[in-house]
Image (cartoon, grey):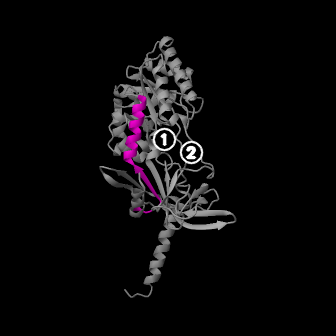
């Protein structure tokens, strides 16, 4: 997105502000599809940025849903159940049943444990509806199941007339920079699927694989897996599998990161000792770069508006929070820094807007806007106060006290009146 559009967004909607370029999002999705080929499916993990869900429901084959809140977003957006891939480490019985009542057998469901499987057995037996399941293989953490437990799940499913294992789900982590790591995972999954076929006598038609491709957030930090040649190497590893079935690649960060911008206005500048400080109206409660450590790395950013003049200086950019940890970046060389200018932080389309400490110090949530060449600007969320979420509700003792104080004030104001 060019500077003029970002300047317009800041002037029209104010700061802090999240801007998501849907044209850039579409272009990145097409890049990934071209790299993986037409035979590989694409799933968007909406936890990366739920504001992009409606757009990605048109662009991707699936939307991964990991919570009841995400499910409600999809339901209110009227995304067809056929597009949903219901996942998440904790799926309560009442939550599973609520989703099943709505989606029934029209979408696919991951299975994180034997306990979760029993919920699917109970509901499908009671309603005589066939369900498509994806048991999740663990990578050695709290998610999914090991091979022994996976085998138990297969045995239970074989006894049910309404359950079908359509595929295996595997995701081991994010921000992977090594092609060798991805190739090793593909090889491991290939061996497992072949063993399931030959030893367990079960044919698995599908694999849902989250490679966790890293995104190059910082200046001078290229990522091998994110480049075109890295994506091509991943596709070649998939093509070389002995197991032949349909593979869906599950991505969030690699799809959405580059479409996002975080705009924050410079409110004050000062020099303490040898350090030039730039204080902005946002902060790290609203923006998060994976791998950033107290501002030690330099993200991609620009100063708005217009061409910058003057001497280049090294600036430490800090936010509005009352904590020394609120450092967005250190010793970043910029020109034209002054109060009133806008800093546009790039590559904030995934997680950056979602992982911050949004309620800390009760600052308002920034507005959220999207831009698309054909549709123009769209305001998805106005700036919202958060202090109401950090205080007792009206029905609490605190609310009653406030109401009593208001009545007392009103009574005092009326004490001189004759009725």
Q: Residue at x 49, y 67 (%)?
A: 340
Q: Is residue 30 magenta?
A: yes
Q: Residue at x 38, y 52 (%)?
A: 370
- Residue matched to label 2: 290
Confirm whether residue 212 shows in the render.
no
Q: Main secondary structure of the magenta part?
A: helix
Circle 2 residues within 10 Å: few <14, some 14–19, many ≥20: some
Q: Is residue 92 magenta?
A: no
Q: Secondary structure at mark 1?
A: helix
Q: Residue at x 46, y 52 (%)?
A: 261
- Residue matched to label 1: 253
Q: Is residue 243 above or below residue 69?
A: above
Furthest toward the left, the residue is 374
Tell me if 122 is positioned left or right of 199 in this view.
left
Q: Residue at x 35, y 35 (%)?
A: 83
Q: Which residues are magenta?
A: 13-36
Q: Position of residue 357 (x, y in %)?
A: 55, 53
Could you tell which of marks 2 and 1 lies nearer the N-terminus? 1
Viewer-nearest residue: 119 or 249: 249
Q: Position of residue 22 (x, y in %)?
A: 37, 47
Give how far apart the Cα atoms at labels 2 and 1 are: 10 Å
Q: Position of residue 201 (x, y in %)?
A: 46, 12
Q: Secondary structure at mark 2?
A: loop
Furthest toward the front, the residue is 310
């Amino acid at each position: 997105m060019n500077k003029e559009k970002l300047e317009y967004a800041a002037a029209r909607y104010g700061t802090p502000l999240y801007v998501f370029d849907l044209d850039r999002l579409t272009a990145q999705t097409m890049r990934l599809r071209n790299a993986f080929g037409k035979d590989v499916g694409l799933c968007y993990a909406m936890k990366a940025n739920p504001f992009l869900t409606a757009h990605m429901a048109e662009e991707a084959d699936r939307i991964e849903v990991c919570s009841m809140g995400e499910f409600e977003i999809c339901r209110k957006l009227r995304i067809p159940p056929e597009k949903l891939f219901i996942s998440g480490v904790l799926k309560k019985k009442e939550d599973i049943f609520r989703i099943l009542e709505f989606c029934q057998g029209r979408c696919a469901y991951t299975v994180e444990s034997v306990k979760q499987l029993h919920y699917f057995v109970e509901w499908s037996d009671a309603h005589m509806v066939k369900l498509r399941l994806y048991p999740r293989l663990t990578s050695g953490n709290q998610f999914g199941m090991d091979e022994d437990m996976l085998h138990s799940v297969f045995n239970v499913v074989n006894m049910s007339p309404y359950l079908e294992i359509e595929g295996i789900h595997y995701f081991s982590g994010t921000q992977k920079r090594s092609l060798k790591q991805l190739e090793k995972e593909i090889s491991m999954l290939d061996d497992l699927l072949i063993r399931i076929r030959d030893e367990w006598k079960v044919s698995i038609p599908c694999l849902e694989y989250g490679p966790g491709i890293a995104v190059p957030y910082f200046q001078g930090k290229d990522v091998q897996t994110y480049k075109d040649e890295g994506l091509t190497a991943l596709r070649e590893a998939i093509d070389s599998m002995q197991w032949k079935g349909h593979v869906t690649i599950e991505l969030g960060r690699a799809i959405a990161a580059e479409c996002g911008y975080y705009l924050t206005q410079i409110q004050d500048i000062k020099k303490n000792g040898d350090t030039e400080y730039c204080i902005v109206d946002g902060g790290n409660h609203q923006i998060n770069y994976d791998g950033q450590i107290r501002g030690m790395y330099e993200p991609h950013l620009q100063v708005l508006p217009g061409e910058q003049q003057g001497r280049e200086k090294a600036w430490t950019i800090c936010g509005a929070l009352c904590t020394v940890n609120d450092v967005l970046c250190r010793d970043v060389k910029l020109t034209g820094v002054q109060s009133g200018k806008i800093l546009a932080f790039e590559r904030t389309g995934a997680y950056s807007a979602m992982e911050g400490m949004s309620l800390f110090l009760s600052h308002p949530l920034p507005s959220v806007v999207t831009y698309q060449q054909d549709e123009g600007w769209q305001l998805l969320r106005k700036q919202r106060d958060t202090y109401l979420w950090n205080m007792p509700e009206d029905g609490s003792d605190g609310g009653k006290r406030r109401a009593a104080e208001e009545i007392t004030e009103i009574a005092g104001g009326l004490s001189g009146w004759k009725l």
